[in-house]
């Protein structure tokens, strides 16, 4: 097989993968732009229709979707910023600082990632009730401020991207730990932090279970909880639900379009150095 033929075959495979990845979003737009009768027909529509603007108005009339978007943005941005800052600091400490019990503490952090989330729901719910946070965004934000995966990711990135000799040289030159973290560690970890920020934002934006448990769905839901209200009842209006899903997906798509170059660069750098 010639090089040109192999290149064409790889391009064809990648094109199929891209189209398969985009098809769910396209199909959501198609269903959202038709009524239930069209969708339930023997031959489902394959092209977008003209009902989307009306369904958008129905979504905002059925639930306070603007408040849901605002609440999801507050939660996702806060959790993402906290994860990036706290996990880079923790990763720097675990990678290059020497203190008693460092390896044992890091083992505990890694082991905590293996504990199923469901095991912590009841005690965390009791704690949220004791703090008076039920129905408030603090109940969603605070438990997600830092994760074991984020710390592990940034510790590995710090060991690869920040040589110990560079940290020692900065310390010999009189830099405090805070200045080393700010002027040496953070710039070196920017590609990895971009990838972590994107993954954390998407996970936080799409989180459904915990916001459903601790937020009042009738007052201040996030986007995913608001979508569950659209799907509730004896009759499911699929075009209305998928209209809400498309509206809830748009911020993530826009964010990815903005940071796509940094995310791809961070992944490629990790692939090359890892």
Image: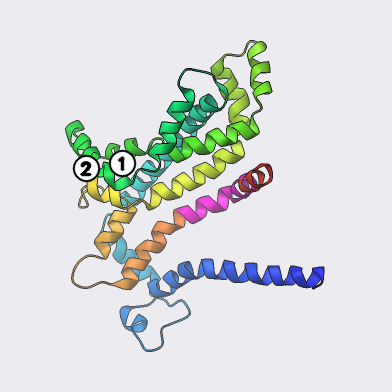
Q: How many numbered badges does the structure rendering display?
A: 2
**Residue closer to the observer: 87 or 115:** 115
Tag 1–tag 2 contact (CB < 8 Å): no
The answer to whether residue 37 is left or right of residue 135 is: right
- Residue 128 is at least partly visible in this image: yes
User: Residue at 48% across / 79% down in the picture?
Assistant: 47
Marks 1/2: CA distance? 14 Å
User: Residue 95: x, y in percent?
Assistant: 56, 27
User: Residue 173: x, y in percent?
Assistant: 67, 11
**Residue closer to the observer: 12 or 240:** 12
Badge 1 or badge 2: first in the primary sequence: 2
User: Residue 211: x, y in percent?
Assistant: 28, 48
**Above or below, 158 relative to 102:** below
- Residue 147 is at least partly visible in this image: no
Marker disc for residue 124? none
Camera-near label (1 vs 2) is 2
**Above or below, 59 relative to 97:** below
User: Residue at 32% across / 83% down in the picture?
Assistant: 37
Q: Is mark 2 on a helix, strand or loop?
A: helix
The answer to whether residue 181 is left or right of residue 41 is: right
Q: Is mark 1 on a helix, strand or loop?
A: helix
**Residue closer to the observer: 198 or 61:** 198
Q: Give the range drawn in magenta.
A: 252-266
User: Can you identify the residue that label 1 sits on?
Assistant: 140
Q: Main secondary structure of the magenta part?
A: helix
User: Can you identify the residue that label 2 sits on?
Assistant: 122
User: Residue at 53% across / 35% down in the picture?
Assistant: 154
């Amino acid at each position: 097989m010639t090089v040109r033929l192999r290149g064409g075959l790889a391009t064809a495979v990648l094109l199929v993968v891209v189209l398969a990845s985009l098809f769910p979003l396209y199909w959501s737009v198609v269903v959202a732009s038709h009524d239930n009768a069209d969708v339930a027909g023997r031959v489902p529509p394959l092209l977008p229709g003209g009902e989307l603007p009306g369904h958008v108005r129905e979504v905002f009339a059925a639930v306070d979707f603007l408040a849901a978007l605002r609440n999801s943005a507050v939660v996702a941005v806060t959790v993402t910023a906290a994860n990036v800052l706290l996990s880079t600091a923790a990763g720097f400490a675990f990678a290059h600082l020497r203190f008693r019990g460092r390896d044992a503490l890091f083992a505990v952090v890694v082991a905590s990632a293996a504990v199923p989330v469901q095991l912590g729901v009841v005690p965390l719910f009791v704690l949220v009730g004791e703090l008076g946070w039920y129905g408030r965004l603090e109940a969603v934000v605070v438990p997600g401020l830092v994760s074991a995966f984020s710390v592990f990711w940034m510790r590995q990135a710090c060991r690869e991207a920040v040589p110990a000799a560079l940290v020692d040289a900065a310390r010999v030159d009189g830099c405090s730990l805070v200045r080393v973290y700010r002027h040496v560690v953070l710039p070196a970890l920017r590609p990895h932090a971009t990838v972590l920020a994107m993954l954390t934002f998407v996970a936080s934006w799409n989180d459904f279970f915990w916001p459903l448990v601790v937020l009042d769905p009738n007052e201040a839901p996030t986007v995913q909880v608001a979508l569950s209200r659209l799907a509730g009842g004896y009759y499911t209006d699929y075009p209305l639900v998928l209209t809400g899903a498309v509206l809830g997906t748009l911020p993530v798509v826009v964010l990815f379009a903005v940071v796509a170059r940094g995310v791809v660069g961070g992944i490629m750098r990790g692939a090359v150095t890892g």
